[in-house]
Image (cartoon, rainbow, N blue to C red):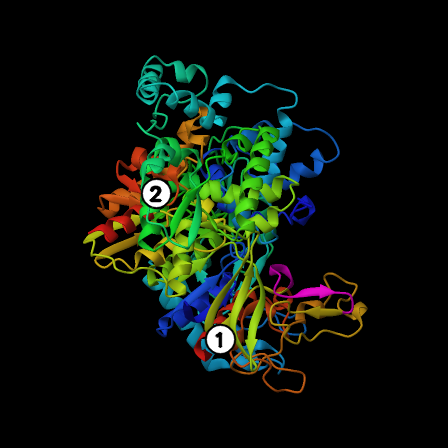
Amino acid sequence: MKMYQHNPDNCTACTACVSQCPVTAVTRKFRGPKMVGPALERLRLSQEDAEPSLEYCSNCKNCDMACPSGVPISTLNMLARAKSFKNRKHSLGEELLAHGEKMAKLAVNLPGGAFFANMGMHIGSGLGLMRMVGITGQRSLPAYAAESFLSQFKKLRQQIFPDKVVFYPGCFINYNDPQVGMDFVAVMQANRYEVIVEEEFVCCGSPMVVTGYLAEAEQHAEKNSELIKKWREKSVPVITCCTSCGLMLKQEYQELYDIEGLAENAKNLYDACEFLLLLADKGKLNTQFAALEEKVIYHAPCHLRAQGFGLPALDLLEFIPGLTVENADAGCCGLSGNYGFKADKYDISMDIGERLFARIKGSGTATAVSDCGTCRLQIAHGAGVAAVHPVTLLRQAYQR
Amino acid sequence: MRESDVIVIGSGFAGLIAAAAADKRGKKVTVLSKGVGTLTIGGGTIDLLGYGNDGRPLANPAAGLAAIEPAHPYKKIGSPAIYAAIKFFLAICESAGYPYLGRLEEMKWIPTAAGTLKPTCLVPKTMDTTCLKSAHTVYAAGFQGLKDYYPHLVAKNLSKLPGYDKNYEIVMVNPHFTDGRDVSALDVARWLDTGTGRKECIRQLVKKVKAGAVILMPPVLGTSPDYQVLEEMETALDCRLVETVAIPPSVTGFRLRSMMLNYLKTAGVRIIEQVSVARAIMEKGKCLGVVTQNIDRERTYYAKNFILANGGFYGGGLRAEPGQAIEPIFNLPVEAPAKQEEWGNRQLFSPEKQSFAKIGITVDNKMRPLAPNGSIAIENIFIAGRNLRGYDFCFEKSGNGVALASGYQAAMSV
């Protein structure tokens, strides 16, 4: 049984979601979450109905967070979006953006592949090829790391501890930002945990769901769920450092798919910072942090806020002496996974992020901190400030 | 184990005020929030008490309070705390650079989008109607495409009311919106947030309005809790601007919520969004913690005291079941007529208060929930806002007022 029945009639049309939707705030092309979500869903239940402005929903989940009646508005949108592809084809750009994992595998499995792929993307961008397929040329696609997380991890010699956790790296950390994964492993080692990486894990499916590849994402959900179940049965927690992967594995699988054991699996899935904070609650967090005399600004990803356990990174970073953390509290960054990479969404994405960029620039800090990989990309692009995952700061403080 | 001094359940106006007041007292406060509350729907005004039990308008809220019935939350809270709550709120507004106007001894009648007048007590400066008294010409301004706001209607209906016998002229502003979406007041306010929007609006208006006049407009003067848009436009047009109360999404409510959230976050109050509190962990008649039920798993939040401000039937703080009303988290006693057919009278716009509206939790003067025998049901729980028994906010126009006074009183009691 799916956890939610997606009843649009729970919507009282109060407009709370409209007031909080970051896309509605910057463009009139989107008819807004209330209209496109529950209001039109009532019509879609009786007849097929294609709403062109549906493509403007970024699935950031601010509508769900605003709703006093618990309507999963963004998920109604994603279901409708997938349906809309019954009668039309995906563009090449959508095909590419939905399948980052496939692309990355192609790139890194060739000798020197990451280098040539990055160069290729650069040239492709320069020649306007990206724009031709509907991908913006105004920002670079995230570059591939010279060596994937998995490859680096395999070479690492960990200390063996009886306590173990499984790490779900996700595509972005694995192929683009492996240092976050390595930092996570180091932090867990400092807390006397051995980290297991399940090589069979596949992309969580988030980029596919937002691009309408619902059935394909379901195959990923089945595969990942089977593996998460295996570790759940051994009572080994599964941890993500990527908030969008975490949200997909815990929540969106349950909202979208009818796969056995999802609810039980979700109980065994943890966000990295939440897990560490739970250790602190039990008095088990290694608090031997050296001082980091630094001021940083924290940006809370929407997909973290949507998970309903607050902002654990803020509490966790308080353990580091000398570190001053300011909460940007400036709403959505605007990138929303692959949304801001689409040529026709780039401006919207940047307009949404403007509040955050201004806030970061105005703070005079050289480092931003955010749990989400694409938020970090957007901050670097829009605010011109280096952005790191909270575990990176923790690792630094352990190592000094 | 993390433990707060106070956990506030609910982030509507009652919850936000309770959190602010508890923080002011030096307490470590955590707010557990689900949805954005009704602040972005309501008009952003603080209605204290507009009508008496007979449905007649009161001379002023203070006069109404003097005659309030014993079961009403205001009677429990008492006048000194109500005055203190108002003072506390006005100080927050002042420090935020978004001062509100008003006092208990004065009823403010403010114009609505239907051209009627609504009684209230505390309002943002954008709703100050004193300039209307001496005005000869009043421009009723509208915005092309703005849904459910017709300046003709505003002018026509207002002109029939005492004190509003003015020379009305209709002026329309074209914000040049494209695409097919409905235009809401929030859209117009966001347009006026931008320098180009303000400039264009001023350019269109300045040709049509005479200096020294009053311009009545929908609530669109910017989304930030400040008066930059108001001041810039008043200076440029040499006119006074007055915002009316209009339908959701409410810009003035949006500003009020932003102001409160900014205040709390700056103060260091932790706000945890998107949580449903499912049950409480009790020991010896005291609550130790509350358990949230999310889609992944349960989490427990511990505190010394709890303020329950999760919004009555609408917010899910109370639940109606066949033959009874329940409070689902602490299972507190809820007073409701035993016969369900007596929960409402058949006239929706009845000249009496609706009994379903008065259903709620009975409290003592510290906002502690009472059992039917009058004893305190749970000693470290305090109730604020719509969960309280004994008032019909819609009938008497007291919604944000009860939220303010009870949120403040609950925070003073923890």
Q: Which residues are magenta?
A: B313-323
Q: Amino acid at mark 2?
A: Leu
- How far across and down, in percent of the image, does residue A371 sit? 38, 45
Q: Which residue is mark 2?
A: A356
Mark 1 falls within which chain?
B
- Residue B188 visible in the picture: no
Q: CA distance from mark 2 to mark 1?
A: 35 Å
At numbered mark 2, what does the secondary structure look like: helix, strand or loop?
A: helix
At numbered mark 1, what does the secondary structure look like: helix, strand or loop?
A: helix
Dots 2 and 1 on the same chain: no
> Residue at the spot x=21%, y=53% of the render?
A292
B320 part of magenta stretch: yes
- How far across and down, in percent of the image, does residue A94 sit? 50, 23
- Left or right, B226 with respect to A66, comes to left
- Residue A197 visible in the picture: yes
Mark 2 falls within which chain?
A
